[in-house]
Image (cartoon, rainbow, N blue to C red):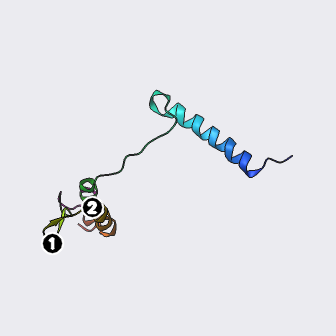
Amino acid sequence: RAPHRRELAQQLTEQLEAALSRLSPAGASRVVVRRLTPTETERLQGFPDGHTATSGGKPQADSPRYKQMGNAVAVPVFA
């Protein structure tokens, strides 16, 4: 009998979790990648720190800052 998709998915999940637990510190079963800060995204794009911190003289939330950096062209690529 061929295994069903759900059974295959469960097997793959178990295998992946076992492999990740061997790779991650202290046997953790999940690998967590932290989000970059807006300042880090500015640096990666070649802009000065705080470049997107304000808009029209008012402080901006992180969400529009991420959006601006995501739409930006990396300056160091052209320099």
> Counting other residues with Cα less than 10 Å from the Cα at mark 2, is it few (<14), some (14-19), or many (20 or more)?
some
Q: Residue at x 47, y 40 (%)?
A: 31
Give the left or right position of residue 24, taking residue 68 as reference. Answer: right
Q: Which of 63 and 68 lies nearest the eye of the viewer?
A: 63
Q: Amino acid at mark 1?
A: Gly
Q: Which of 79 and 4 lies nearest the eye of the viewer?
A: 4
Q: Is residue 47 within the magenta segment?
A: yes
Q: Which of 7 and 42 lies nearest the eye of the viewer?
A: 7
The span picked out in magenta is 43-50
Q: Which residue position is annotated with label 2?
A: 45
Quadrant for the C terminus in the image: bottom left
On the image, the x and y values in percent for residue 5 come to 73, 51
Answer above or below: position of 46 versus 30. below
In the drawing, what numbered circle is on residue 19?
none
Q: Splitting the image into 4 quarters, where does residue 7 fall?
A: top right
Q: Splitting the image into 4 quarters, where does residue 10 fall?
A: top right
Q: Splitting the image into 4 quarters, where does residue 11 fall?
A: top right
Answer above or below: position of 1 versus 42. above
User: Hey, which residue is sitting farthest left in the picture?
Assistant: 57
Number of labelled discs? 2
Distance CA(mark 1)–CA(mark 2): 21 Å
Q: Residue at x 23, y 55 (%)?
A: 39
Q: Which residue position is annotated with label 1?
A: 56
On the image, the x and y values in percent for residue 77 come to 29, 65
Q: Please tell me whether the stretch drawn in magenta is mainly helix, strand or loop.
A: loop
On the image, the x and y values in percent for residue 58 come to 15, 66
On the image, the x and y values in percent for residue 49 come to 18, 57
Q: Amino acid at mark 2?
A: Gln
Q: Residue at x 17, y 59 (%)?
A: 50
